Image (cartoon, coloured by chain):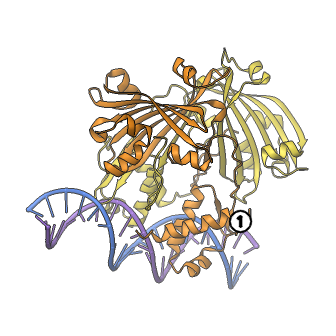
Chain colours: A yellow, B orange, C purple, D blue
Amino acid sequence: MPRAKYDHIYKDLKEKIETEVYAYQEMLPSENVLVTEYGCSRNTVRRAIAELTADGYVQPMHGKGVRNIFRPVEQTAFIVGGIESFKESAIRNKKTPYTKVLQFTEITVDEKIERRTGFKKGTELYYIQRLRSLDGKPLILDHNYFLKELTYGLTPEIAERSVYDYLEGVKGITITTSKRTLTVERVTQVDEKYLDLRDYNCMAVITSQTFDDNGIQFEYTQSRHRPDYFRFQDVATRRKGPGEKHAVFS
Amino acid sequence: MPRAKYDHIYKDLKEKIETEVYAYQEMLPSENVLVTEYGCSRNTVRRAIAELTADGYVQPMHGKGVRNIFRPVEQTAFIVGGIESFKESAIRNKKTPYTKVLQFTEITVDEKIERRTGFKKGTELYYIQRLRSLDGKPLILDHNYFLKELTYGLTPEIAERSVYDYLEGVKGITITTSKRTLTVERVTQVDEKYLDLRDYNCMAVITSQTFDDNGIQFEYTQSRHRPDYFRFQDVATRRKGPGEKHAVFS
DNA sequence: GCCGATTTGTCCGTATGTATC
DNA sequence: CGATACATACGGACAAATCGG
């Protein structure tokens, strides 16, 4: 499958930025130069730059050029950042992942679960509880709720390997949008039982609702992270237009 | 100042979605219909839809249409979400903000501060420590470092009102990009002194590096939030292209 | 300060590809 | 198979910001 042209340019520029072919604070070649370099239209170059901007890699400046503002991050903790699976995050963080299934049951949604998960009352779900370890160290406790109608055939064995490989590969589900909320919550007895929390009495909790390409929510997940191995990254770009908001907390 | 055309369409569609002119899970009018409605080109409509997609409001489906997946959020805690100032967040959360300046000093960057903040050694900064309250309840402890060269003239009085109003209004600085990292850290003595933490021994911490429109970092801030009043929201969209990553932790 | 060259920002019309129905 | 809808790409036009002479 041939990638889209803008995606090729995006990845190429991204690598050049990461490997400092363009130095920090340096200008990238102008759009017109890139057009001739890549042999494409200006719109295509602009689309690639737009993606780099969203990644926080570059900053276009009207009338001046596009500046590289990428800074490599030191990798101390387990970085959660963008969109990727547990296994992929582990690889990027250069650690060995391991998953242990603690529970695997089927449940029917009641009012209480409906409010929390967004699934309607009466819906049938798989409920899975999993312990995630990196380099043998248990760090994350996951509570997954999968819509049975779309994910029928799930087993504990699949849950131990990769649910998403199964859903995408076998079931043909395409994951598109994920709404996430990050909070800090008190530890539970289950947290304490499986994770080495020392004297921490809080957990970093990511709850996410995930949709397929039909706009159907097929998953609700609560990921409870050990706080000292947790890091979430984000790039916020200011919206243009007059009468706009400004930045974060100042 | 006349808005850009795509921005007008974006805001118009956004409002229609929020007021449920288009119901949840309903399809928006097709791009071609919108083209005739707004009297513009298809590219312009597509740009507006792209922004709504990034906001997690809609989900375009190849060959089918664009589905509304917007759900209003219940406002329990203090939601941090997108890009906005403390004051604006307070207003959106329907609370009364108050800021107390605890410290206001000038410092010079040493190696230790350089590593943490990204400012070069020898640079002169303003260091401000502020306590943020909502409805009289102290919730956030801010540590700000501002590049003196760009923010010269800051005073404790300004810090008590709004630093950003001063920087944007008086100094003519334009805020563009903000890189944020969210972690969970242990409480400090200062946290305990000013915030009512009960028995929590952790804080939700947002550290951010903010850049102006010249790509110059002029701010480093650490915002320490009381955990039980903290909530961070995010929408992750899956990248297209073959051989791609999938979603969050499953 | 003015003017022209450069560069990014916005918008248009069109063509073609691909997925859905 | 054809009609519809979104996805990608092209080329051109003009506006707005910047910079140098």
- The subunit carrying tag 1 is B
Looking at the image, residue B39 lies above or below residue B234:
below
Residue shown at 28% from the left, 39% from the top = B152
- Please identify the quarter of the rendering in which residue B183 is found: top right
Return the x and y of residue B4 as percentages of the image width and height.
Answer: 45, 69
Q: Is residue A170 left or right of residue A120?
A: left
**Residue sitting nearer the eye, A125 or A201:** A201
- How packed mark 1 is, by other alpha carbons closer than 10 Å (few <14, some 14-19, many 20 or more), is some
**Residue sitting nearer the eye, A224 or B201:** B201
Q: Quick check: can you spot residue A72?
A: no
Return the x and y of residue B97 as percentages of the image width and height.
Answer: 55, 41
Residue shown at 85% from the left, 45% from the top = A125
Q: Is residue A146 left or right of residue A208?
A: right
Which amino acid is tagged 1?
A: Glu
Q: Is residue A29 left or right of residue B17?
A: left
- Quadrant holding the C terminus of chain B: top right
- Quadrant holding the N terminus of chain B: bottom left
Return the x and y of residue B31 as percentages of the image width and height.
Answer: 60, 74
Q: Which residue is mark 1?
A: B20
Looking at the image, residue A174 lies above or below residue A248:
below
Residue shown at 70% from the left, 69% from the top = B21
Looking at the image, residue B145 lies above or below residue B53:
above
Q: Is residue A242 left or right of residue B74?
A: left
Total number of numbered labels?
Answer: 1
**Residue sitting nearer the eye, A3 or A49:** A49
**Residue sitting nearer the eye, A26 or A182:** A182
- Please identify the quarter of the rendering in which residue B139 is found: top right
- Please identify the quarter of the rendering in which residue B3 is found: bottom left
Q: Quick check: can you spot residue A53?
A: yes
- Which SS class for mark 1? loop
Return the x and y of residue A37 as percentages of the image width and height.
Answer: 33, 59
